[in-house]
Amino acid sequence: MEVAHTPYRQAMALTMEGVHHTFGNLAVVRGVDLDVAPGEVVCLLGPSGCGKTTLLRIAAGLETLQRGRVSLNGGEIAVPKGRHVPPEKRNVGLAFQDSALFPHLTVLENVTFGLRGEPTRQRRERALTLLDQLGMSDYADTYPHMLSGGQQQRVALARALAPSPQLMLLDEPFSSLDARLRDRIRDDTLHVLKKVGAATLLVTHDPEEAMFMADRIALMRDGCIVQVGTPRELYCAPCDPFVVAFFGEVN
Ligand code: ADP
């Protein structure tokens, strides 16, 4: 006999509902609904100034929520004029275009920094594993000023991943790198994100990067999401001429 069961609804790692944000009179995010499932990489794609970074900063808790709701793993973390869980309590990993490392700490110490409270050996092992996965284990005892920009960016990604955050928020993490290096770091980063199963929201203005990295792409224009779907859906079944024009730039 077949057993009837209630469909299981997996809690989203991140859910944003009806999010609006203004700076003075300028509405930069206008009614955005977006979610990221555990283990999924969602790329927030769109031209410069369309509101991507602001939306990411709202998810991180770096901007106060003005309108809408934000939940992490099913629990509400921000309500306008109400609950606001601060960034350090959200269990999110952050890496930006120019993530600054602590200059007085070695590479290893930079990565273990966020793991305080765990036994030293465990912290060290976890950090070395991540550094190895990102091709940086030979530099564990090196100081940041001795590294290239690309190497520093790899360390910043390892540091963000070290505490096993439920959600990784990445803002143009590869854009300061030269093209050849960028491809390799993208590759390694995607590999590590998938290996650790992190839910990831990645901001980029580069359609090619989104096509490569994303399980789903959310394409933004003027503070609104125009279309969300797999890279294939956006490329093969665009819902708006803007989507066609945007992906026309991919070679
Ligand atoms: P994107 O990441 O897509 O380039 P942003 O979210 O950085 O877009 O910015 C969206 C708009 O909000 C831009 O017009 C930008 O100038 C403006 N903006 C961003 N941050 C601030 C701020 N702190 N104060 C005023 N305007 C801002």
Image (cartoon, rainbow, N blue to C red):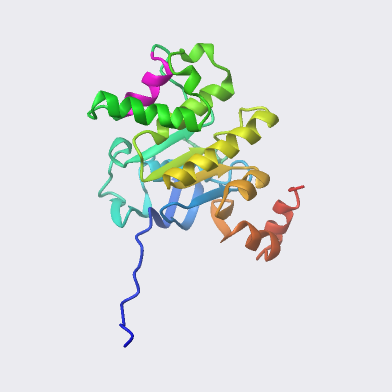
Residue toward you, 2 or 238: 2
Q: In which quarter of the image is residue 108?
A: top left
Residue toward you, 177 or 107: 107
239 versus 173 height, above or below: below
Residue located at (55% from left, 49% from top): 43
Residue located at (47% from left, 26% from top): 155
48 versus 110 height, above or below: below
Q: Is the magenta stretch mostly helix, strand or loop?
A: helix
37 versus 61 height, above or below: below
Residue farthest to the front?
Answer: 1
Which quadrant does the N terminus fall into? bottom left
Residue located at (62% from left, 34% from top): 184
Magenta region: 105-114
Residue located at (65% from left, 60% from top): 232
Residue toward you, 112 or 21: 112
Q: In this view, does 247 lie to the left or right of 190?
A: right
Q: Is residue 172 magenta?
A: no
Residue farthest to the bottom?
Answer: 1
